[in-house]
Image (cartoon, grey):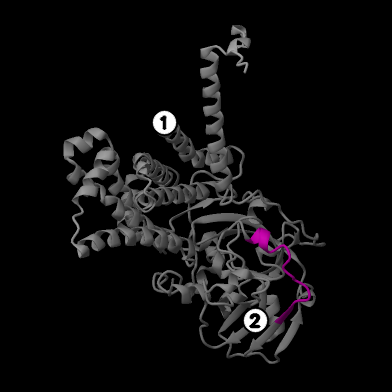
């Protein structure tokens, strides 16, 4: 089953990019294609971050524990679309001018937040291999990978800060992130209040990756 | 009971193993294509379909204007499908689709405040007040993009002269129509509705300030502010209010919509100024259709005509 599912999910994850390329080649990106590409890749990054964060609640609530096998790929796609999003800014907005970029990061808080979200993804992408998990040990690896919470939060804040007036869409992302984080808080507090050890499932989770 | 042996399948009919495996590969490929198509269809829902541009009525007898720029005009399709018109939607491709049924007739404009005589003018009376001129203006949005548009209209001063404001009038305030049924964007409190913009009297009397009712030789498309809008080319685009129903003269600086929404970012004046940042740098802009960004000019390049209005003013303070 997984043998077919993983490649299927991989293809599905590339579809957003394929659509963007198709639209670009067919002049379907509207009057301001660069702005359209920037917004599109930014949305993709947030969506993939939230999908990645949804895997743990989903597998536990539905007891579909095999879902863990998809998490790394989804997280790496978040990093992939995040890189494309960053590159639209670096190239098409700042034209690789380091002075301009640094000034923007320092001065514009929405750029500071976005950059924070991206930088936090880098160690996660670098340590996404099985080798890294073995080398670091499950607990430390897991602790490091909790950075994704902060990366996603920074991404949502980036969006909230950049809109001019209409907060509807960024707040939708914030609401989804809120629910996904609430699950984690409940899952953390609940067993403790009942005096049940959490060590076992955590260890099992890492070994499944 | 006769149990027939499976021997009636001739060996020639047995699918060779390699072909059988190919069939599996084919199915896998088809499944992949299916996955891709399904994901694509889902995403398509989020992406705007191709847009159509509305053609308006041609306006006759348009005069040329010395205020026009000779720069390349932005295609009509871009100007009519890329609109910041929050009364309809905060997505720029939406107003073109949502404003198709917006009613621009009958249309009255109230003249109020510090005037000799309050009155209500019909749009068809207003457009005949003065000869229609084509003004090809640069238009710079605070978001960092710009366009070149051949507007049709006449100087705002023509209307103001006929409105006859009293000597006490220091500002002129404009209000957009407030009609939630026609403008679904007004059902959400994204901005304070109705939209209000204002100019100082001397700014409003400057001949560059244009009262526009057409573009590209035709009636204004609804999504571009029909039937009557302001065009103030040396200020950021949001000052150029659309679908005007009220003009009020006052002695106090009016509260304007974007200024109320975010005072540190959107000042009352909002002159195009590459030296004053808003929520991002205003030093450069992207002309729609161009790849490289170009430097933004002080007063959007209209300094010769309007800089004197602000002599002695600290434009970093009065942004």
**Residue most toward the right?**
B60
Residue A197 can be seen, yes or no: yes
Residue B187: quarter of image = bottom right
Q: Give the range drawn in magenta.
A: B95-109
Closer to the camera in the image, B272 or A166: A166
Q: Which mark is residue A166?
A: none
Q: Residue A18 vs residue B184: left or right?
A: left
Q: Locate residue B296, reporting x and y percent.
A: 48, 56
| Secondary element at image label 1 | helix
Q: Is residue B207 above or below residue B70?
A: below
Closer to the camera in the image, A33 or B259: A33
Q: Locate residue A105, reporting x and y percent.
A: 32, 54
Closer to the camera in the image, A87 or B154: A87
Look at mark 1 in the image and give the residue it sits on. A3
Residue A103 can be seen, yes or no: no
Residue B229: quarter of image = bottom right
């Amino acid at each position: 089953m997984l043998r077919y599912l993983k490649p299927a999910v991989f293809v599905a994850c590339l579809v957003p990019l394929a659509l963007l390329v198709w639209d670009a080649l067919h002049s379907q990106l509207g009057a301001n294609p660069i702005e359209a590409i920037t917004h599109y890749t930014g949305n993709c990054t947030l969506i993939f971050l939230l999908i990645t964060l949804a895997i743990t609640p989903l597998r536990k609530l539905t007891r579909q524990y095999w879902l863990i096998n998809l998490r790394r790929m989804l997280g790496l796609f978040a990093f992939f679309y995040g890189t494309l999003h960053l590159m639209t800014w670096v190239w098409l907005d700042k034209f690789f001018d380091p002075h301009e970029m640094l000034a923007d990061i320092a001065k514009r808080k929405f750029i500071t937040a976005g950059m924070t979200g991206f930088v936090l993804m880098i160690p996660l992408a670098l340590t996404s291999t099985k080798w890294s998990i073995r080398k670091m040990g499950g607990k430390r690896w897991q602790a490091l990978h909790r950075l994704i919470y902060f990366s996603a939060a920074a991404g949502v804040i980036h969006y909230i800060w950049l809109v001019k007036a209409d907060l509807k869409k960024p707040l939708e992302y914030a609401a989804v992130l809120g629910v996904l984080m609430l699950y984690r808080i409940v899952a953390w507090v609940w067993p403790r209040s009942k005096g049940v050890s959490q060590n076992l499932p955590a260890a099992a989770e890492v070994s499944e990756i | 009971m006769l149990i027939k042996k499976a021997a009636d399948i001739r060996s020639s009919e047995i699918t060779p193993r390699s072909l059988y495996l190919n069939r599996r590969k084919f199915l896998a490929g088809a499944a992949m294509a299916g996955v891709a198509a399904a994901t694509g269809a889902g995403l398509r829902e989020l992406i705007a379909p191709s847009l159509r541009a509305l053609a308006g009525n041609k306006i006759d007898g348009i005069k040329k204007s010395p205020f026009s720029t000779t720069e390349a005009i932005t295609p009509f399709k871009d100007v009519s499908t890329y609109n910041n018109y929050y009364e309809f939607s905060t997505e720029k491709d939406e107003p073109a689709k949502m404003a198709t049924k917006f009613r621009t007739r009958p249309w009255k404009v109230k003249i109020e405040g510090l005037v000799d005589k309050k009155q209500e003018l019909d749009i068809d009376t207003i457009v005949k007040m003065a000869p229609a001129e084509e003004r090809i203006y640069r238009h710079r949005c605070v978001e960092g993009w710009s366009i070149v548009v051949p507007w049709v209209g006449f100087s705002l001063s023509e209307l103001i002269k006929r409105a006859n404001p009293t000597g006490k009038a220091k500002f002129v305030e404009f209000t957009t129509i407030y009609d939630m049924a026609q403008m679904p964007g007004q059902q959400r409190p994204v901005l304070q509705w109705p939209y209000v913009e204002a100019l100082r009297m001397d700014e409003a009397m400057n001949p560059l300030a244009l009262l526009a009712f057409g573009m590209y030789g035709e009636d204004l498309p609804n999504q571009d502010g029909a039937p009557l809008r302001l065009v103030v080319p040396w200020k950021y685009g949001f000052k150029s209010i659309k679908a005007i129903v009220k003009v009020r003269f006052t002695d106090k600086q009016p509260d304007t919509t974007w200024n109320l929404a975010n005072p540190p970012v959107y000042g009352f004046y909002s002159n195009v100024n590459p030296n004053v940042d808003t929520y991002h740098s205003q030093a450069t802009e992207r002309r729609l259709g161009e790849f490289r960004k170009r430097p933004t000019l002080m007063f959007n390049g209209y300094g010769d005509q309007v800089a004197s209005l602000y002599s002695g003013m600290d434009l970093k303070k009065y942004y």
